[in-house]
Structure formats: C-alpha cells, structure tokens
Amino acid sequence: MQKWYHIIPKNTGLSSYVWIIFCLLPFLFIFRSSSMYEVAFGIIMTLIFFLSYRLSFVSNSGWIYLWVSVEMAISLVMTLFFGYVYFALFIAFFIGNVRHFGGFLSLYIVHLTTTLIAVTTTLITEIEALFPQLPFIIITIIGVILLPFTVRYRNQQQKLEGELENANERISQLMVLEERERIARDLHDTLGQKLSMIGLKGELAGKLVSKNPDRAITEIDDIQQTARTALKEVRDMVSNMRGNKLEDELIRVQQIIEAAEMEYSMDGDPSLKNTPLLVENVLSMCLKEAATNIVKHSQATHCHVSISQYPTEILVSIEDNGTGMPENIEPFQGHGLQGIRERLEFVNGHLTIESEKGTTLILHVPNVIKHVEKEDYS
C-alpha cells in the first residue's frame, strides 16, 4: 500500500499538477451554489472526503472498506448536487492499491456502478450545466474503468522487480561467498603443501650444514625450486582472479543486446596489445554495465561499440539510438553511471557522456604498457 501522505497518486500517467487541480476543483463547483448552506455543506463534504482518503491508507484491512464506502458516498453526493465527478478518480486509484483480489474486485464493481448511476442521473437532470465538461466526464469514466487495473498491475510489477532485485542480491552474496571459499581452497592447495615442504627441507638443511654440506646444498636447491614453483602458481591464480579479457566480454555484451532484439555492431580490435589484465577487467565491467543500461532504459533499436587503442590512451565507446538522457536528471545519479565512473577512476580513467539522438558513453583509460616480468627468485 502507499503511505498515508500519498494523497496525490503516483505512477498513474497523469502529472501531479493535474491531481492538484482535482483537489482544488471541487471548491469551484461548490462556490457556484447560490445558498451559503450548500457552500458550507460542499466544503464539509470535501474535507471529510480527504480525511477519509488519508485514513484509508493508514487503516487496517477491516477499516479500509468503511473509509472507501464513505468516499464513494461523498463522491456520489458531490456528483448529484454539484456535478463534481472527479473524486471518482481518487477512489479508483486507491482501489488499485487493494492487495486482496476479492476486495479489489468488489470495490471496483461497486465504485464503477455507483459512478455510472450518478453521472447518468446528473446528465439527465442537468444536461445543460454539464454539457461543456462532457469530454472531461467521459475521460473520468474511462479512468474509473482502467485506472484500478493499471495501478494494480504496476504495483505487482514493482513487487516482482523488488523480489527479483533481492534474489539477484542474494545470488551475488552467495557467489562472493563461493568465490571466497574457492580462493581459500586454491590457496591451501597451492601454498599449503609447498610451504610445509619448504619448512621441512629448511629444518633438514639446517641440521645437515655441519654434518653433510653437499646434502644441505641439495636441500637448499630444492627449497629454491619449490619456492619458484609456488610463486608461479600464485601468480597464475591471481591472474585468473583478476577478471575477463575485453574480447571475451564483448561476446557476452553482443548476446545481451541481441537478446533484447536490438541490432549490434562493433569496430576496432578488441584484442588489446600489452594492456594489463586489470585494465581490461575494468573496461569489461564498464562495458557490461553500459550494455545493461541500454537494454533497460534507452528504448533503442541499435547499439554500436567502437574500440580504439592509441599510444597514450584506450577509448571504448558505446553508442545507442535511443531516447537519450532526460535533461532534468543528473547524469551520474542513476543508471549505474556512477559505478562506471568510479571503476574508471580506479585505473586513472574517466567517462564522457554525449546525449544527442541517443546516448554515447566514451570510456577513457590511459594506455599503460605492460612490461613482461622476468621470473626470478633470489
């Protein structure tokens, strides 16, 4: 359910300003009355309606039906006496938030029936007064018919998205835990046995130094060889942990784009020359995040990836032909762009955004040449 302060409905396809007008509009209909008693009665009914509307959001399930009944009665009275039918939209919105399907369906049928009866009766008795606003009355009736189902569908969709997000977060936590356990096993298997061997041979060499120097030298050579082997295995293990290469990630990005029924194209050489694997890992993660954003938010039909490697920097651009970024949204406050920027800053890179006829993200990373290290141990 919405919070009590959500008097103005959200996610209904109408601007908040329209709902504010609906809140103030009944007073215009009320003040057209000639009698002060009618004006006072209309104001009291309007205040009671909004009070009941507020209480319907904070009450338990049993009281909800009471407050909605009060709202329907007031809406019926306001329609018959003042020709004001727009309270029906507020009620329709609230009915869409009722979780129990039986209660939702019952309230929907009663509300639709009473609204149609009130509008029909008012049009028959006051056709001349209501004729100028007939198009708005028709729109209101359409809203009473469709709005509850629209709100209910959106609430269910948001609930499923929340559950999916929680499930993905849980999966991520389990993956991290599994990765930690795998690292622990690899470290134990890689280093445990060899460090134990180095310790035993070190003790043996210490005992043989005075008794059998040649044997002690042999044991020391074995210690050095075992240490070199352990160092190489650790380097290989750390290298595998650092992440995927860019050309491997591009295959997954293409699958993501094409799975969303978008066209995919790419130019440039994805096989970066002498680039540290950490830099490729950062570019891969940023590229995957950008592709996910395009699928979720851009409404594009085409995605183009371009890769360029210059002597001083590496440029990876991701371009789409979607709707572009809204002007009223700060670029780095949503859609994962903040995460992309932070990852690039970790390797002294930066992000450039262009939003004309779509959106283009340009990933800038300094071209730090990886030097081949000689494996030496002393």
Image (tube, grey):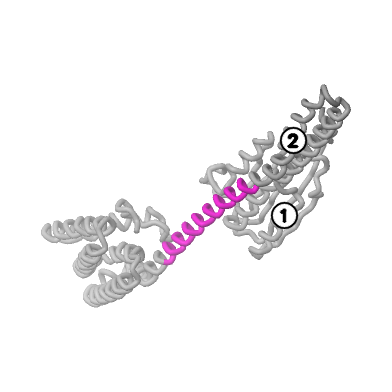
Q: Image check: 176 left or right of 366?
A: left
Q: Please identify the quadrant where the N terminus is shown.
A: bottom left
User: Residue at label 2?
Assistant: 366
**Label number found at residue 150:** none
The residue that mark 1 highlights is 304
Span colored in magenta = 153-182
| First along the sequence among labels 1 and 2 | 1
Q: Quadrant of residue 58?
A: bottom left
- Foreground pick, 276 / 219: 219
Give neighbour class at mark 1: few <14, some 14-19, many 20+ (Cα, 10 Å).
Answer: some
In the picture as drawn, the residue positioned furthest to the right comes out as 214
- Residue 83 versus residue 355: which sits nearer the camera? 355
Using residue 49 as the reference point, say whether residue 166 is left or right of it: right
Task: Residue at 23%, 76% (x, y): give it.
Answer: 121
Q: Nearer the viewer, mark 1 or mark 2?
A: 2
Q: Is residue 20 visible?
A: no
Viewer-closest of 130 and 322 = 322
Residue type beneath disc 2: Pro
Give the structural element (helix, strand or loop) at label 1: strand
Name above or below for residue 224 compared with residue 114.
Answer: above
Give the alpha-carbon distance from disc 1 to disc 2, as whole Å: 22 Å
- The question of residue 164 being in magenta is answered with yes
Q: Quadrant of residue 88?
A: bottom left
- What residue is drawn where x is 21% and y is 75%? 125
Against 9, residue 330 (above or below) is above
Residue shown at 69%/36% (left/top)?
347
